Image (cartoon, rainbow, N blue to C red):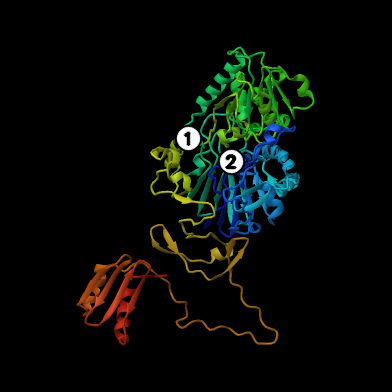
Amino acid sequence: MKLYCLSGHPTLPCNVLKFKSTTIMLDCALDTTSVLNYLPLPLVHSPRLSKLPGWISKDGTINLEKKELLDLSTIDVILISNYHCMMALPYITEHTGFTGTVYATEPTLQIGRYATAHLMQLSFYSSNPEMNNFYHNNMKVTLYTFMSAFRLMTNLNIMIKNQEVVGFFLELFGAVQISPLSSGYSLGSSNWIIQSHHEKVSYVSGSSLLTTHPQPMDQSSLKNSDVLILTGLTQMPTANPDGMLGEFCSNLAMTIRAGGNVLVPCYSSGVIYDLLECLYQFIDSANLGTTPFYFISPVANSSLEFSQIFAEWLCHNKQTKVYLPEPPFPHAELIQTNKLKHYPSIHGDFSSDFKQPCVVFTGHPSLRFGDVVHFMELWGKSNLNTIIFTEPDFSYLDALAPYQPLAMKCVYCPIDTRLNFHQVSKLLKEVQPLHVVCPDQYTQPPPSQSHRSDLMLELQPPPMPYRRCSVLNLPFRRCYERVYILPELANSLVPSELKPGVSVANVSAILHSKDNKHTLQVTAPAPPSKKRKRVVEEPPVGGAPKPLLSGAVPLEPFLATLQKHGITEVKVEETTDGHILHLQAEDTLIQLEEDGTHIVCDNNEPLRTTIRDLVLRFLQKL
């Protein structure tokens, strides 16, 4: 079993597992932080931005050559954990020769489509002769190629399983079974179990134990794992999500009361649902009932509507509301009362409805493209306005760099509900996997906080770390394989009891293997030849097959037996597997081991035969 690591970002994973003749990609996230190296794309020409110097790499060039770790066309299936981890999926399905199947829950697939729609705006960059280049893991990806793949998103060969998150499994080529478990992180997010009849691998990515809108994390199904692959822990281990929500609401209220506007750069789904729910409970107590809230995104309407219909993927309290019937999320009421309005862009109806002071949720969190660039240009010169960063994926200082000097206030309230190191350590103690595999970053404290040993994984045995472009041989060997036996063959067997509860039988059969399933079948007699006379095979000497031997040779009784037969000078040496008996006068060795007995006796066949017969006295014949 091998694990190939194709990503160097611990919260944007892409790994490939080779297990029982199958090749499984675990997530295919895209690291888009490289957009911070480029200037913002305004909706209208900005003289100030156009005068800023362009970004040049440290060596003055852009490295386009990347060594490919493995052939992606050999991948059988891709398992997607959440919508953050599928951004490179269009590129893989359209440009790598991949012909397998992608498995994702329906909410993950739908929300992922909306998230990629934000990146569609990047296609404007393709007119630039110095085209931006993204690198997904170990693959060269030009933005033009990537966006052309996004345009084929509707043609993806994706199999959707719209059932209870713990209610189904599927078989892969008869070799392994794969099944999703609720991870508690986002709507439809899942961890994955990959198991054969005798081995079990758990893949934990982007999970949360906090009580938010998704279905709670399924922890019990992770027990008894031979290997647990861990990734996607929180990027903000020292920031409490509840505390960040409180700061978000407090700063928002202070700005509105002072007559300013609030800008929240965000994704079109995920944390925004929790922000809107928090504001729903906060608006009246803070006297913000007349403040307009705007959600601007090409997929704003679809995102808000789909969040209301995937009831089976929600926590119990929200599922209960569906059966009343009531909308599970409070943003439905905010929309009905016109406290929250959503628009596909700042053009059209928004221009006529726009009122200040207000709160605007829009993307992209990098501040490099989308409608957020327009609001940065519009509101950045006033210290009455505030921008509140809630997404942890991008450095807010780097995001703001092209807009400096900036008069508007900046507040950093990163909300990341994924597991922190304390929570994951407790989880691993409960599920007790034999081996844990994780990114190298999790085995040491952050460089900026090298004294914080609590911000790393300390396990016994220590976890196996991996790095980008590394290949790990996972630390367990397959010892057993399940074999089925046909009824007619089973009826012919005559078991012999070795010890109470343990019986064995001698089997002569044909092993038939197909689709990774093995069956013992009755040996059929050879058909008679038309040209030759049928030859009847003579039975072996003695009239019966050689018996099978079982049991162990006990040391002390065997030494006593040797002594009775005149072999007295015996030197005994203990080994890791048993004992070695040196018959000094006879210059003979006898190895008594757990799985066999060996007699080394040169040029003395009568002695060897005698010792063999003495050994056979202690073994049981079947």
Q: In the rendered image, is residue 101 in sight? A: yes
**As drawn, is 103 to the left or to the right of 545?**
right
Q: Amino acid at mark 2?
A: Ser
The front one of 37 and 486 is 37
SS of the residue under disc 2: strand
Residue type beneath disc 1: Pro
Residue 166 in the image: state x and y as whole percent: 58, 40
Q: Quadrant of the C terminus?
A: bottom left
**Nearest to the observer: residue 29 or residue 219:** 29
The reply to whether callout 2 and callout 1 are in contact (CB within 8 Å) is no
How crowded is the residue under tag 1: few (<14 C-alpha within 10 Å), some, or many (20+)? some
Q: Residue 359 appears at what percent x and percent y?
A: 65, 21
Mark 2 or mark 1: which comes first in sequence? 2
- Is label 1 in a helix, a strand or a loop? loop
**Residue 525 image offset from top left, x and y in percent:** 61, 76
Q: In the drawing, does residue 590 fall left or right of residue 32?
A: left
Residue at screen point 47% across, 48% down: 440
Q: Would you call the spot at circle 2 few (<14 residues within 10 Å), some (14-19), or many (20 or more)? A: many
In this rendering, which labeled residue sits more in front, label 2 or label 1? 1
For residue 422, what is the image quadrant?
A: top left
Residue 319 visible, this orientation: no
Judged from this view, the residue extending furthest toward the left is 568
Residue positioned 40% across, 45% down in the render: 459
Per the rendering, the mark at residue 526 is none
Residue 110 at x, y percent in the picture: 69, 38
Give whichever of 586, 219 is nearer the camera.
219
Residue 21, quarter of picture:
bottom right
Q: CA distance from mark 2 to mark 1?
A: 21 Å
**Residue designated by label 1:** 237
- Give left or right: position of 96 versus 431: right
- What residue would you read off at disc 2? 190
Residue 501, relative to residue 164: is it above or below? below
